[in-house]
Amino acid sequence: MNIAAAQSGGPTSAINASLAGIFSEAKMTEGIDRIYGSLNGIEGIINGNLIDINDFIKTNYDLELMKLTPSTVLGSCRYKLPPVEENKEVYEKILSCFKKHDIGIFFYIGGNDSMDTVSKLSEYFRENNIDIKVIGIPKTIDNDLKCTDHTPGFGSAAKYLAVTLQEITRDSSVYNLPSVTVVEIMGRDAGWLTASSCVLRANGEESPHLIYLPEASFTDEKFLNDVRSELDKNNTVIVAVSEGIKSDNGSYAAEAFQSGADDAFGHKYLSGIGKYLETLIRNEIGCKVRSIELNVMQRCASHMVSKTDVDESFRIGSEGVKAAVAGNTGKMMAFRRMKGLPYFCSVTAVDVKDVANKEKKFPSEWINSEGNNVTDEAIDYFLPLIQGEVSIPMQNGMPVHIKL
């Protein structure tokens, strides 16, 4: 029997570690021969565009390099698998590819929308008595998947965000004049990543002074009052804001600054809240102000990767192979955090139907009463996820990345 793996959705610093975990475990598993990689997600399966990963990963150094290479070495996609009753032909193409290459297990590494594909495929195989296992391996810097304590890729993004905000704080505080810096952070409908900036308080930092999440309603008037209040206490004010913060009426607060375009899954392309708030502060308060949109940098900053994140991402890929070989299908691998210290997570398999097309919001009880910051309970949750540093392979003063 052969297996295949694919990667989908937005890239992260640790998604290739999960692929490395799948590869490593499969190489040690009796009964598994070839390990295929599908190029550009499920589209590679549909179009028969596969590679044999054994041809590229030949040494332990190759494997370690793949673990520490950011983004998706197999490429990605934003393809939405239609319901089988709407397009049976695409399912038949997928089945034909699997039969042609004798593939008995398929691993899909991705986020919420990718788990929708895992759910639809596994259900199709089950209803048609086809013995092909489908397992989802979670991934997203948004940390918004249900049924898991956290998602691979999130810890590294949170670590990069904390370090970047700390450096922005140092840079912004050199002049003796009032200033506000607004940092726009990814997070369409869940504010986990923006909220994680609170970990700076564990090192005695006051910034970010204000934190705004999609889970709390937002008004321009309240925001301006918050900024004025912080300027009365601090010469330099740092604001962390999710790209998807919403007004009281449910619309995105910066819709006038956004394209209005949707992706394949109907999600709005968001950006512009930082520039919107910068303009608002400049016009209404008049102090020195700048906005910084971190954009894609927060996803693939492998130079600031969390060792905990990389190790757990590798492990959850490995456990996915064990679960599939044991007969599981239609499952997503998930983390279960053990209570108490030291920090430890076990890995389990959950029904992918409980994950697909659902979203885990940042807990309302961890948002302060003013809706402009988070509580210390959030620090306890986030801090273990950004721990540890790895030794990055370097050449000519720059990180080395593997390319398949």
Image (cartoon, rainbow, N blue to C red):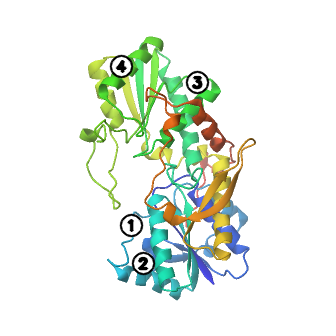
Q: Residue furthest left?
A: 256
Label 2: state its secondary structure: helix
Q: CA distance from mark 4 to mark 1?
A: 43 Å
Horizontal placement of 302 versus 46: left or right?
right
- The residue type indicated by label 3 comes to Glu
| Among the two numbered marks 4 and 1 on one chain, the one whose residue lies closer to the N terminus | 1
Count of numbered marks: 4
Q: CA distance from mark 4 to mark 2?
A: 54 Å
**Disc number at residue 46?**
2
- Measured from the top left, where is residue 345 in percent x and y? 69, 52
Q: Is residue 266 above or below residue 368?
A: below
| Among the two numbered marks 3 and 2 on one chain, the one whose residue lies closer to the N terminus | 2
Report the quarter where the C terminus lies. Answer: bottom right
Reading the image, the residue beneath label 3 is 205
| Among the two numbered marks 4 and 2 on one chain, the one whose residue lies closer to the N terminus | 2
Label 3: state its secondary structure: loop
- Measured from the top left, where is residue 341 in percent x and y? 75, 41
Q: Could you tell me if the residues under marks 1 and 2 are in contact, i.e. CB atoms within 8 Å?
A: yes
Q: Could you tell me if the residues under marks 1 and 3 are in contact, i.e. CB atoms within 8 Å?
A: no
| Among the two numbered marks 1 and 2 on one chain, the one whose residue lies closer to the N terminus | 2
Reading the image, the residue beneath label 1 is 79
Viewer-side label of 4, 2: 4
Reading the image, the residue beneath label 4 is 225
- Disc 2 residue crowd, few under 14, some 14–19, many 20+, Cα 10 Å: many
- Disc 1 residue crowd, few under 14, some 14–19, many 20+, Cα 10 Å: some
Viewer-side label of 4, 1: 4
Instruction: Write down the quadrant of residue 280 in the picture.
Output: top left
